[in-house]
Amino acid sequence: PIPVIIDCDTGVDDALALLFAVRHPGIDLRAVTCVAGNTDVDGVVRNTLTVLEQAGAGDIPVARGAARPLIEPVRTAQHVHGLDGMGDLGLPAPTRVALDMDAVTLLRREILASPTPVTLVPTAPLTNIALLLRTHPEVVRNIERIVFMGGAVATGNATPVAEFNVWHDPEAAAVLLTAGVPITMYGLDVFQQVLVPAADVQRLRASPEPSLRMAGELLAHRDPATSGDPTPTGGLGDAGAVCAVVDPDGLTTELLPVEVSLAPGPTRGQTVVDRRPRPGESEIHEGEREVTLVDVGLAVDVERYVKLW
Ligand code: BDR
Ligand code: CA
């Protein structure tokens, strides 16, 4: 199995990502780290512990990370994910607490301890990942790839051009993009496509198995008419990024230069993806800046990922 660490802000669709990662035999989920995003970091920790426990994976190490972005204030998305950040489904409180160790320390420990290189899957603002890369740069030698949910080639959700995870902490996203490891961007363009048919959602909701029932309730909770959520009811959201780890062939990517706009104003947090043809160029320079090439998800086989999940 592929050693995987998820860094999340659970989060309705982060929960769907965790459930999938826990159950897929091709994934060895080594740890889960939490960061402020959809809700405050303590809420994220609580939700993450609950989901893992419901899925029978109460032994996976969980650590609390950054309570706010590097520069920006916290701007949660409770209008999308509910007051508790998990759809206000009345899920039970967890019976354990997070490790007495911060997220960056746990990330370093698990990455360096893994006998084979780890795939990191951030499904949240990139604050923890930026802090990790700056504090312990030696971790890159044992990272296979970073598959992150974030960014958008076309339209944003937090702003007309910026996707929430990148917009919440643009400086952190900029650090990620210059990490010097292979990166896959699972952005809004594909994120919004992967919808579970209503009949399957109903089947999950009727399941006698608690984690399947929870998955069904999570998929069902959003009303796109009132939530203003980019992911209509039934969206796998962040879980699609984990699908891209075990089944990369379901995602059509192109290796493209990507930069984050850090400028104040209407473009802040935008992922600027350069789709101009660049025959023969393997290193991209924009003036003084060296721009990283990222495998950008441009299309997704929806049926394949829904079935896989
Ligand atoms: C991202 O923001 C969160 O609401 C989702 O969990 C996803 O990670 C989408 O922009
Ligand atoms: Ca998320």
Image: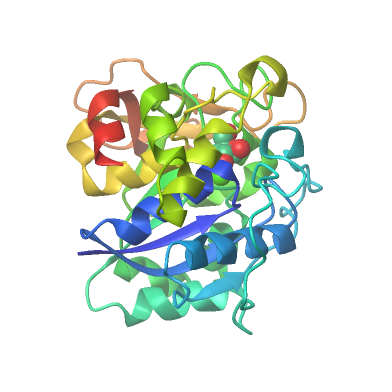
Could you tell me which residue is drawn at 43 percent across and 35 percent down? 236
Left or right of residue 31, residue 256 in this image: left
Residue found at the very far bottom of the displayed protein:
100
Q: Nearer the viewer, residue 109 or 84?
A: 84
Image quadrant holding the N terminus, namely bottom left
Q: Residue at x 28, y 16 (%)?
A: 277
Q: Quadrant of the C terminus?
A: top left
Residue occupying image coordinates x 47% and y 47%: 213
Ligand 2, what quadrant? top right
Q: Is residue 219 left or right of residue 185?
A: right
Q: Is residue 257 above or below residue 3?
A: above
Q: Position of residue 252 (x, y in %)?
A: 24, 27
The image shows residue 198, relative to residue 218, as above or below, that is: above
Q: How many marks?
A: 0
Q: Give left or right: position of 133 versus 110.
A: right
Relative image position of residue 301 (x, y in whole percent): 25, 25
Residue drawn 54% across and 67% down? Answer: 132
In this orientation, does residue 177 appear? no
Q: Quadrant of residue 60?
A: bottom left
Above-or-below relation of 234 to 2: above
Colour scheme employed for the rendering of this structure: rainbow
Q: Position of residue 292 (x, y in %)?
A: 40, 40
Q: Nearer the viewer, residue 142 or 33?
A: 33
The foreground one among 5 and 228 is 228
Residue 206 appears in which quarter of the rendering?
Answer: top left
Q: Residue furthest right?
A: 73
Residue 227: give x, y in percent of width and height: 70, 24
Q: Nearer the viewer, residue 81 or 244?
A: 81
Classify residue 116 by image quadrant: bottom left
Say if 118 sits above or below 188 in the image.
Answer: below
